[in-house]
Image (cartoon, rainbow, N blue to C red):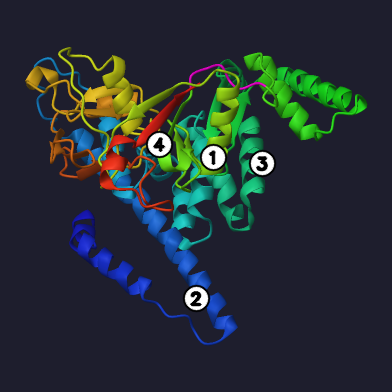
Amino acid sequence: MEQQQEETAWQAGDLHALADLLASLAPAGLPSEHLDQLEALERIKSACAAAQVVVTSRFADAAEAEDAPAARSGRRTPPRAMSVGAEVALAILASPHAGEQRVLLSRRLRDDLPLTLAALARGELTEARAFTLAREVAHLTPEQRHRVDADLAPRLPGLGDLTLRRAVRRLCLTLAADAETRRYRRARADRHVTSRALDDGTGRLTAILPLEVLAAVRTALDTAAATARADGDTRTGGQVRADTLAARITGLDPATDPPTMKVNLVIGVESLFGDGTEPGLINGVGFLPAALCTDLVRRASAAAKATLRRLFATPEDRALVAMESTSRRFDGLLAELLTLRDAGTCRTPGCNATIRHLDHVRRAADGGPTTAANGQGLCERCNHVKETPGWTTWVADPGDTTRHEVHGVTEHLRITRSTSPPLPGGPTGGWHYSPAELHLASNYTLAT
């Protein structure tokens, strides 16, 4: 039976041809037929997701069963699951962490939730709901997962996102009360804070806290908002709560006090002086409109908390010039240059994590120099994955006249390509400066 399945398996070329066929699909004539097409396409999406689950699981099994290439002397070997997840991530255009999670959830669906996987293949639920179910039963034993799967299977087509999660939670509390208690205790021990930059010049701060602590925090913020309203404060309640939270953490009122910590703001000189509209870049966070960056500069300068540093870039593609060090470590201004050049974000394709390690593209032990051309910013996970036996990376087109580019090949011949982002500045959206002016007065870094 398995041999017959292998003989009738679709090859990658067949799947690409199917994708091309669907991409050229023309809408039907009648509105009712449009809805029929949407329904059929949604089923195809679910069937593709189920097929990805099977293929991902099979690849992970095969990769882990292989004899891994021998590690070179002195090289740390990361866990096998980490490199397998990284290769899956490259195939599905996701981050390495998401690839590792995809492998874990795919195996769970295949091995412990077969009825849910079958429902996904039939188009009775979406990929997101199938993975939600797989996540919610992570703390259960395989036998308990099978019981949840069997209980939910007849009801899956009628469950939405919230009702599915509630149904799974109820079954978990019924079938595995002890495991649920341990899960709640682990969650309380795993309290943490995360932050995320939004696309409008703001960011979201998220704190995972025990419920009683959360209630106390909320009460304190509500009290501050009520007091401000009673005192005639013109800010909204939401603004007061946000400002109070920031003030109690930093000791500064964000409505009146410029921040005292170091913030690297990279902005083209033409935008800084009001002649251009190219946005500025806060390292590791994102872009801000030119007018808002100019306002931040003025506020920091008025408070005597701003310093300016000139950075030189090639006028053609906004690439920072190179620096080098005689040390084997990237430190000092060279470290800062690498972090600024890579915009504070891991260079691995699909990875959005913050830079934690400054890495030699060609290992120092193999003769790789400590230079900007041979350096790149990586997160901790990607730096470890890079050391997997069978993986290799190299600098493409080294030099300081073009943007930095790193190529690589994984153990199973996935090709990677990473190009450093262009710095803000240049003629786009602003005045036309001569190449000499752009080269000599390219960028300022604000350290406030």
Estimate the spatial distance between the alpha carbons at disc 1 and disc 4, rounded to whole Å: 37 Å
Q: Which residue is mark 1?
A: 147
Residue 140, percent across and down? 51, 30
Whether residue 406 is situated above or below residue 188 in the rendered picture:
below
Quick one: 362 or 322, which is closer to the camera?
A: 322
Confirm or deny contact between disc 1 and disc 4 (CB under 8 A).
no
16, 307: nearer the viewer: 307
Q: Which residue is mark 4?
A: 352
Q: Amino acid at mark 1?
A: Arg
The CA distance from mark 1 to mark 2 is: 35 Å
Where is 313 relative to 231, above or below? below
Q: Residue at x 32, y 67 (%)?
A: 19
Q: Nearer the viewer, mark 1 or mark 4?
A: 4
Residue 37, label in figure: 2
- Indicate yes or no whether the magenta region holds residue 156: no
Residue annotated with mark 3? 166
Camera-nearest residue between 104 and 351: 351
**Real-space CA distance between mark 3 and mark 1, rounded to the nearest whole angstrom:** 16 Å
> Which badge, 4 or 2, comes first in the chain's sequence?
2
Helix, strand or loop under label 2: helix
Q: Secondary structure at mark 1?
A: helix
As drawn, the label of residue 224 is none
Q: Position of residue 410 (x, y in %)?
A: 18, 38
The region drawn magenta spans 257-262
- x, y percentage for residue 383? 27, 26
Cβ atoms under marks 3 and 1 closer than 8 Å: no
Q: CA distance from mark 2 to mark 3?
A: 31 Å
Mark 4 or 3, which is nearer the eye?
4
- Report the residue that reaches farthest toward the right: 230
Mark in front: 4 vs 2: 4
Q: Indicate which disc, 1 or 2, sits on the residue closer to the N terminus.
A: 2
